[in-house]
Every structure is written in C-alpha cells, then in structure tokens.
Amino acid sequence: MALEILVSSVAATLTTAAFVPQALHIIRCKETRAISLQMYVAFAIGVAFWLLFGFMIWNWPMIVANTITLALALTILTMKLKYG
C-alpha cells in the first residue's frame, strides 16, 4: 500500500469517526438550535471540496470518508432549516 493511501486512510477514518457520533445525536434528537447554520454551510462546502479533490487524485479513502461526512452534514443542514 502506498504511503499516501495509508496516511489518508488513517486521517479519513479518524476525522469521519469523530464527526459521526455528534451527527447521529443531532439526527436522533432533532435538536439543532445550538448549532450554527453558517458553520455547517461552510463545513459542508469544505467537505464537498475535499470530496472533489479526492476524486481529482483518485484517493478512495478521501472519497469514502468525505461522501459519508457530506451526507451527514447535509442532513444536519436540512434539519437545521426545518427545525431551526
């Protein structure tokens, strides 16, 4: 395995694993009042660019992790707009 794939796999796994519990809590509780809409918009855009970059360099750990994170972030954004 190439070193860059190993490093990106560890980074992608850790950052996505760190985000998932908070995202699942927000989704389960439908409580979005305490989160910032602007931060989640910026975060989702940033993740979308990381996903695009992953496709540009064809780095599958980046693609998988950022697809999961973007899906969760967009779900949270939708809930923020729906539930305030």
Image (cartoon, grey):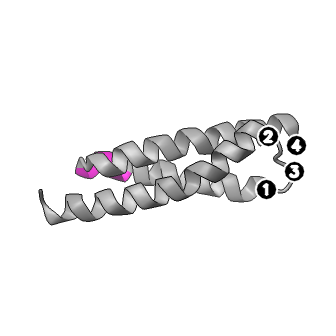
Amino acid type for the residue under numbered disc 2: Cys
Residue 35, numbered circle: 1
Amino acid type for the residue under numbered disc 1: Ile
- Report which residue position mark 2 lands on: 29
The answer to which of marks 3 and 4 sits earlier in the sequence is: 3
Identify the residue at image location x=70%, y=59%.
39
Residue 84, numbered circle: 4
Q: Find the magenta span and give its range.
A: 53-57
Amino acid type for the residue under numbered disc 4: Gly
State the CA–CA distance, disc 4 to disc 1: 9 Å
Q: Considering the image in quadrants, where does the N terminus appear?
A: bottom left
Q: Along the horizontal axis of the image, is 61 left or right of 84?
A: left
Q: Residue 26 falls in which quadrant of the image?
A: top right
Identify the residue at image location x=22%, y=61%.
6
State the CA–CA distance, disc 2 to disc 4: 13 Å
Q: Along the horizontal axis of the image, is 1 left or right of 22?
A: left
- Report which residue position mark 3 lands on: 33
Q: Where residue 2 sits in the image (x, y, percent)? A: 12, 60
Could one spot residue 39 in this view of the protein? yes
Q: Along the horizontal axis of the image, is 15 left or right of 62?
A: right
State the CA–CA distance, disc 1 to disc 3: 6 Å
Q: Where residue 21 sits in the image (x, y, percent)? A: 61, 50
The answer to which of marks 2 and 4 sits earlier in the sequence is: 2
Q: Is residue 33 above or below residue 11?
A: above
